Image: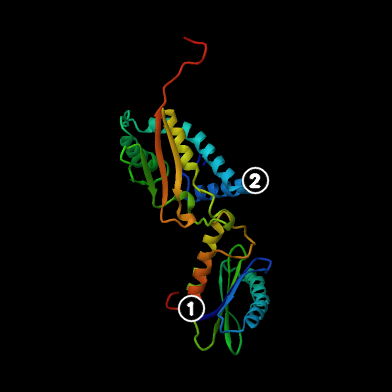
Amino acid sequence: MAVCIAVLTKDNCPLYIASDPAEDGLKMHFLVHTSIDVIEEKLNSATAANDPRDLYLGQLYPNEDYRIYGYVTNTKIKIVVIESITNPLKDGDARQVFSKVHSGYISLVCNPFYSPGDTITSQPFLNTVTSLMRGKAIA
Amino acid sequence: MSRGRGAVDPKRVSSELFSLTYGCMVAQLLKDFENPEEVNKQLESMGYNIGVRLIDDFLAHTPSVTRCTTLEEVADILCKQGFKMFLGIVPEIKNWTAAKDEFSLVITENPLAEYVELPPNCQDTLWYSNIICGVIRGALEMVQMDVKCSFVGDTLRGNDSTEIRIKFVKILEDSLPAGED
């Protein structure tokens, strides 16, 4: 079960970070922040490897309590999912979570009243993320 | 949409492009006027201008449509052919008054409002698809019918359904300009 889902812009500004209330919010913020470096590194090396751009980056780096997965879209919107090691997501599931968050983000951006770069307050997007965090069964 | 491209039918536009265009237009109007009531009026008058031109296009493409004698016929053609032709939806006709001079159009899937969420400051005042009211009023005016057209509910606002109320006022008689016989 995901304990934290974060969406960042291409300048690495947080658009949306939500974490399970049982977890330490600050620690989640910190982990997301540190994962930015890893994502940037992967992006820079990916250009050399000629990978397609909206790549699921997979597990970013090992940590004793959590697994951190990253995903970047063509428009350099980064999505980070942190989940606890006690309940690991399989590779396919992680991709599903990311693609759901991505589609939620696309619907959000199509709203004419949302400017890209604003923090996300849209209810449908929040509902998607909450349901993803709450249970893999729903995802 | 250039005519030179053989692959895409020049008369068809992606519905998403259409929704996004309309959405940006409403957002821009809100930014310019800042008052949702004013934006409603602007959308209605834009719709009116579209309607007076659209009716000729509609009648040219549907030669089977004849002069309507009752409001029911008008409602029927409006929904089954007019809306179908231009928006690809067929609204339901409901809530006729006893005198048969007023009815409701209920739209289930509004192509204009895909992905739209109203910002909180105009959640209770803006009728997002008000352009449709203007189009209906303009089109019917060109066939000598004066109608009042307004929204009574919108799913974007949290109502159960998107509903337009159309009230027949009178038949317009062509009047001679002043000074002529």
Mark 2 sits on what residue?
A: B32
Image coords of residue A77 (percent x, y): 61, 66
Mark 1 sits on what residue?
A: A134
Nearest the eye: A1 or A127: A127
Density class for disc 2 (Cα within 10 Å; few <14, some 14-19, many ≥20) is: few
Marks 2 and 1: which is nearer the front? 2
User: Disc 1 sits on a residue from what chain?
Assistant: A
Q: Amino acid at mark 1?
A: Arg
Q: How is the image coloured?
A: rainbow
Q: Quadrant of residue A43?
A: bottom right
Q: Amino acid at mark 2?
A: Asp
Q: Quadrant of the C terminus of chain A?
A: bottom left
User: Disc 2 sits on a residue from what chain?
Assistant: B
Image coords of residue B21 (percent x, y): 54, 47
Image coords of residue A7 (percent x, y): 60, 70
Q: CA distance from mark 2 to mark 1?
A: 41 Å
Residue at image x 66%, y 75%?
A36
